[in-house]
């Protein structure tokens, strides 16, 4: 039996509120949906039964608008990390920029596109699940092999500390490709290309790495700005090194 996934749907338009609730109940396994027509009611229901996600419109009446509901939610110590899917174009509200960048809040333009709505709900739930799970760490001693060229790949790594060396064997000769430093990714090319490992990688000193299953890498990068920066840093440095070798 599927675990319960509690949603709160806040929408003043009764027909839309009912449509959204029915979509969730029909298409999301284990969905339990509480509905509200205005902001105070929605926030009260969230306090009584903390949901996995809030789906809200912005026009919820004068007592507490949708924007005010989102602001109050973000400030709450218990509910502050609840994902929010807003059924509206992005408003002129700069205080939501950080929430959008972190993937905690998403806006969906109206009229309601059922497939886009369900896709957004599933993606946000998956991101939340990934964030709630601790990633494994891997420790290597100097000289330890992380992986070998040609091996199948099921994960990438983010280097927390230490330094690694990437190399390939070409015509019987070992060719050094470059070093992988703390704060950079290694093994991500297998995710990008869908191919086996393209190089040997070994530790040059004591290393600690975060293990990231390849199936979660895309969602993680888009939900963790610091990891996005780390991946871009890694790819840019490798491109720069490749260009220098061509000269």
Image: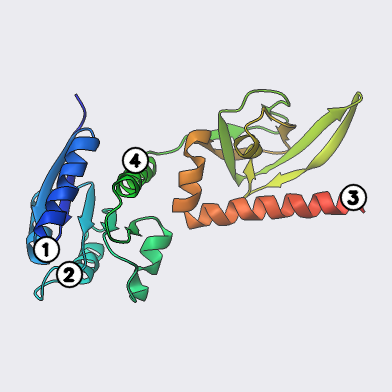
Q: Is residue 105 left or right of residue 217?
A: left
CB under 8 Å between discs 2 and 3: no
Give the x, y percent position of residue 180. Answer: 70, 44
* Residue 51 horizontal side relative to residue 157, left or right: left
Image quadrant where one finds the C terminus: bottom right
Mark carried by residue 129: 4
Label 2: element kind: loop
> Which residue is drawn at the image coordinates 27% and 56% (left, top)?
84
Of label 2 and label 3, which has the lower sequence position? 2
Q: Position of residue 199 (x, y in %)?
A: 75, 32
**Quarter containing the N terminus:** top left
- Is label 1 in a helix, a strand or a loop? loop
Depth order, front residue of 241/112: 112
Spatial CA distance of label 4 from label 1 is 29 Å
Question: Is residue 122 or residue 117 the one in the foreground?
Answer: 117
Residue 121 lies, in percent from the top left, at 30, 46
Marks 1 and 2 sit apart, C-alpha to C-alpha, by 7 Å
Q: From the viewer's perspective, is the residue at label 2 or at label 3 nearer?
A: 2
Q: Quadrant of residue 89?
A: bottom left
Circle 4 crowding by C-alpha within 10 Å: few under 14, some 14–19, many from 20: few
Mark 3 vs 4, N-terminal side:
4
* First-in-chain label (2 vs 4): 2
- Residue where numbered disc 2 is placed: 59
The residue singled out by tag 1 in the image is 12
State the residue position of label 3.
246
Any part of residue 47 in sight: no
């Amino acid at each position: 039996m599927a675990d319960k996934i509690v949603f709160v749907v806040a929408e003043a338009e009764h027909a839309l509120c009912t449509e959204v609730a029915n979509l969730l109940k029909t298409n999301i396994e284990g969905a339990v949906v509480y509905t509200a027509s205005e902001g105070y009611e929605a926030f009260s229901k969230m306090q009584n039964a903390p949901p996995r996600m809030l789906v809200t419109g912005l026009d919820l009446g004068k007592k507490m608008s949708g924007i005010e509901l989102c602001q109050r939610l973000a400030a709450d110590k218990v509910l502050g990390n609840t994902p929010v899917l807003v059924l509206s174009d992005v408003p002129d509200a700069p205080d939501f920029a950080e929430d959008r960048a972190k993937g905690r809040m998403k806006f969906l333009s109206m009229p309601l596109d059922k497939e886009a709505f369900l896709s957004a709900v599933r993606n946000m739930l998956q991101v939340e699940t990934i964030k709630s799970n601790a990633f494994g760490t891997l420790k290597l001693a100097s000289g330890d092999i992380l992986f070998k060229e040609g091996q199948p790949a099921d994960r990438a790594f983010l280097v927390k500390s230490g330094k690694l060396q990437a190399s390939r064997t070409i015509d019987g000769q070992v060719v050094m490709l470059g070093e992988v430093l703390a704060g950079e990714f290694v093994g991500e090319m297998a995710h990008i290309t869908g191919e086996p490992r393209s190089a040997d990688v070994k530790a040059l000193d004591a290393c600690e790495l975060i293990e990231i299953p390849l199936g979660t890498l895309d969602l993680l990068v888009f939900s963790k700005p610091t990891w996005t920066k780390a991946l871009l840093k890694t790819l840019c440095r490798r491109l720069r090194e490749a260009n220098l070798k061509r000269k």
